[in-house]
Image (spheres, grey):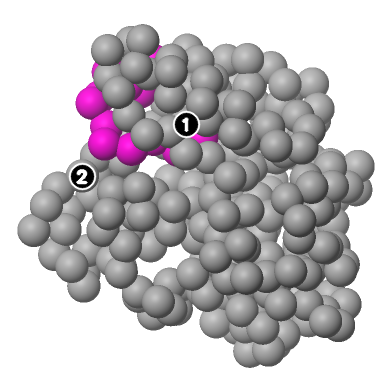
Amino acid sequence: MSSYRVGLLVPSSNTTMETEVPEVLRRVAAVTGDRFTFHASRMRMKTVSAEELAAMNADADRAAVELADADVDVMAYACLVAIMSQGRGAHRDIEKRLTQTAADAGAPVDVKSSAGALVAGLHHLRARKVSLVTPYMKPLTALVVDYIEGEGIEVQDAISLEVDDNLAVGRLDQTKLPEIAGRLDTRGADAVVLSACVQMPSLDAIPGAEAAVGLPVITAATATSWQLLNSLGVYTPVPDSGALFRG
């Protein structure tokens, strides 16, 4: 049995990532006996707009230094679209930058990102074509689609729920997601991204969505959890948590 400190860099208006990632890791802890504690640093963002996302990225170094003071074992930049809106491959530069920032602050730590985790998770599943659901306005969804396609994964279809208030995104009813996912064009798709956003609640909807679409389902939150666990070397399969947690 081991104990780990998990650090999350989150938008100031985030209300979901600090519930769904801990829940996935609680399920893992129930199997392994490991213990996880969670520690967050926040960056100002209330409206999911290109301007606020860029400002949040610029503030990430300050937040990473403050979070590094907690001596966390791993750190995740937990806002997918903030990175994907910066252009193809941006997660690599941002992860490298924040890892160096933490090291310069005297706390060497592996910094991951939800954007990088989603891409890595899809490649792990050998998904060559996906369909996805986002809460974003259509122009931001288009940036997410372009980003994923820039990583060699075709996007067959995308549904935008067009909610730009981040607090409102966190209040979306996830019980509607299986029906929404069922409206996706999934012809030839290998997987469905049920929530391409860490703020849109989706964890409890995964089993129903998988039944609705008949395909493996992942979310930004489950991909981030998977990546964090792999970084710590304590990944284990757990039920009802999507395709990445079936082993």
Is residue 219 something that shows in the picture?
A: no
Asked if the residue under mark 2 is in contact with the one under mark 1, i.e. CB atoms within 8 Å, the reply is no
Q: How many marks?
A: 2
Relative side of 104 to 120, left or right: left
The residue that mark 2 highlights is 4
Is residue 197 positioned above or below 127 on the image? above
Label 1 Cα crowd, 10 Å radius (few <14 / some 14-19 / many 20+): many
Q: Is residue 77 magenta?
A: yes
* Residue at image location 86% in from the left, 83% down from the top: 187
Q: Mark 1: which secondary structure? A: strand
Image spot of residue 221 (x, y percent): 52, 55
Spatial separation of the CA atoms under disc 1 and disc 2? 16 Å
- Residue at 78 percent across and 33 percent down: it is 87
Q: In the visual, does 206 lie left or right of 179? A: left
Residue under numbered circle 1: 9
Q: Position of residue 62 (x, y in %)?
A: 47, 12
Q: Amino acid at mark 2?
A: Tyr
Q: Residue furthest left?
A: 1
208 inside magenta stretch? no
Task: Look at the image and tell me in which quarter the N terminus lies.
Answer: bottom left
Asked whether residue 234 appears in the rendered view, the answer is yes
Q: Which residues are magenta?
A: 64-78
- Up/down of 84 relative to 208, above or below: above
> The residue under label 1 is which amino acid type?
Leu
Name the quadrant of the C terminus: bottom left
Please tell me how crowded label 2 is: few (under 14), some (14-19), or many (20+) other residues with Cα within 10 Å: some
Residue 34, quarter of the rendered image: bottom left
Quadrant of residue 164 in the image?
A: top right
